[in-house]
Amino acid sequence: MKICLFCQQNSIESNLFEWLFDFASHEKYLCQTCRQLFVPIDPQTACPGCGRKQSVRKLCRDCQCWIKNSSRQLLNNRALFCYNLPMKNFFERYKFRGDYQLRLIFQRRIQQAIKQLGNKRVIIPVPVSATTWQQRGFNQVEGFLEGIDYLAALTVKPDFSKDSQSHKKRRQRLASPQPFTLKPQLNLQQQACLLIDDVYTTGRTLYHASKVLQNAGVSSIKSLTLAR
Amino acid sequence: MKISDFYGRLVTVQATTDLTLPQVTKLPAIKTNGKLLYCQRCQQTFSKKQFHLPNGVDYCPYCLQFGRLTSHDLLYTLPEPNLFPINEQPLSWQGKLSPLQQKCAQVLKEQAAIKKEFLLWAVTGAGKTEIMFPAISEAIKKKERICIATPRVDVCNELFPRLQQAFDRTSIVLLHANSPMKYHYSQLVICTTHQLIRFYHAFDLLIIDEVDAFPFVNNQLLQMAVAKARKRISSLLLLTATPTKQLLTKIKQHKLVCGYLPLRFHGHLLPVPQIMTLPNWRRDLLRCQIDRRLFKILEDWFKAGLPVLIFSPEIRLLVEIEKTVKKYFPHLAFSSVYAGDEKREQKVQTMRREKYQLLITTTILERGVTFAKLNVVILGADEQVFHEESLVQIAGRAGRSLKRPTGDVIFVCSMLNQAIKKAVKQIRFLNQEGEKISDENLSFLSAK
Ligand SMILES: [Zn+2]
Ligand SMILES: [Zn+2]
Ligand SMILES: [Zn+2]
């Protein structure tokens, strides 16, 4: 009998229907109770800018500020789940405690979404700094992409510490400098890309990443995050 | 980092730390054995394939809450040196044990001295903590290192101040995930069973209180942690009010020595639950209705000023119960509390100060908490969450104080089931044993 990866307590009852049709296969690592903790976002009604869960499809307040205060383009982000307390807890354990096996919980779900969104697009994960990668032992975004084709086109500039970013206030983060560069000898001219990140918080990370890609001459960019 | 931090502990040291410790033993945190890995801290075996990180390192998924261990880490340890001051009179407790408790304490003291395993089955409200004092006192005199571990954080928090007061010249530390204290080397350790994972042959006397409680019960990792935290020659005392089947089997097979204390500290028998079969209690509740008989009983209790605990089988029902109580008793001071409740601690305190007359709760308050003069109702006593042990524990919340050594317990159920029958049978059995005891005949407590 398999035990739920999230609560590590309840066993998972897989029903025959799921098993036959691989219907909710992304949930095969969660028990009944834990499945309900994560709230999916309906793309039909989500905010078209950041992908936030809403009851009607319209620009959310953050996104309205975003266009008002800068001439920046909206990202058209698709987010799969709400960033609620259980999701926060998930990232706490996956990223900060470093329990790499937890990637499996959402791996299939993310890869399904990539198939829907990223038909013939180049899949590009948001990178972590070399220091983080060495300490954590993995890039949490790449963990979700295991087994599919993707291009690690971006790197964090060596003098840029991402960890110091998480302590900054929202406004400071919005004003932060470009942390990413393109890996040398890559040609992304006229390519359609799909950026993947773990959480959309202020949109700054994705904004910077897409800026680098735009400068590299890509034809279009979409983005996908696990949570918003 | 002090050298004493390593005594009887497994400590992770970052490779960058400059440490000159002559006698220190360094163990690789994770040992590889072909395709399998073994964690030296939590003693679990797991597959290399599953827990291999992209940067080429392996990690242990079982003891992550103490900081992730990888195949690059080392664990440092120094043997427990028992560097404690001479203390001829460690016990500063002024209270007195009843003759029955004294008899029992004597047995524990003897058992603790012979460095073996011993189980004490003492009814709820027997005064287990005080019964341990003489054994602990003896051990302190012999400069032994002592740990009282329990699966429940609330029990830890309740034990710590009592032990600190009872042994006020002895160094003591409280360890659990949210403890306000940081680890320091001490002769007495009060901790959750999880914290034992960090100890390495440290204790001469290890006491596990509430051995039958979650998460310790049926948890192989924690049970292995107990074995590793004890010294090779040491005594292990297990305390419980509701032994599990496995423990009872071990006793029957003579693999575990057991003594039992079937009488409460005040000498009164356990309250026997009254069964009330109400097939529609759930439906009534959703309509904000209470059965007339049950209402009458509650009304009498509230009028008499007696505090009441109502146990709900589900968190979801707490709201419904609150609504119904509000409707029938609009002037009653009450609240509800559940496991994830941020004000849990605060509400329990308010109940203890008798500012609430009723607290509606789930199984989280089934053990470890004592309210004076209490009466108890279990709704849905026939539902799965309430197994035999928890029914006995919950019934045992009543009648614990000298002021009111009796109490009323009502099991409301849709229908009678095995767990209820067995729980009542167990309580009746303990009461029979209790009745046999009189002051002249205290020899019941033979270590069989
Ligand atoms: Zn679960
Ligand atoms: Zn938005
Ligand atoms: Zn481990």
Image (cartoon, rainbow, N blue to C red):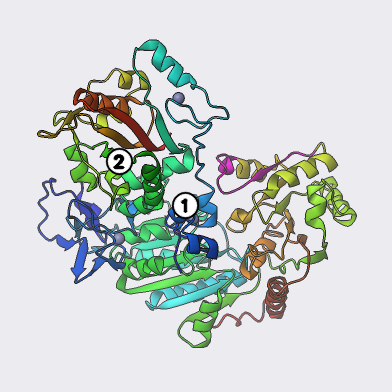
In the rendered structure, are the residues bearing label 1 and label 2 in contact, judged by CB atoms less than 8 Å apart? no
Give the extent of the magenta segment: B332-346
Do the residues at pointers 1 and 2 share their chain? no
Mark 1 or mark 2: which is in front?
2
Task: Say which element carries label 2.
Answer: loop
Q: Position of residue A94 (x, y in %)?
A: 34, 47
Q: Nearer the viewer, residue B222 or A24?
A: A24
Q: Distance from label 1 to label 2 (Cα)? A: 63 Å
What is the chain letter for disc 1? Answer: B
The amino acid sitting under disc 1 is Phe
**Which mark is on residue B160?**
1
Instruction: Sort mark 2 into few (<14), some (14-19) or many (20+) by Cα contacts within 10 Å.
Output: few
The answer to whether residue B329 of the structure is visible from this angle is no
Snapshot quadrant of residue B97: bottom right
Residue that numbered label 2 is attached to: A120
Q: What x and y, as percent, mark residue B375?
A: 75, 55
For the residue pair A75 and A193, the one nearer the viewer reads as A193
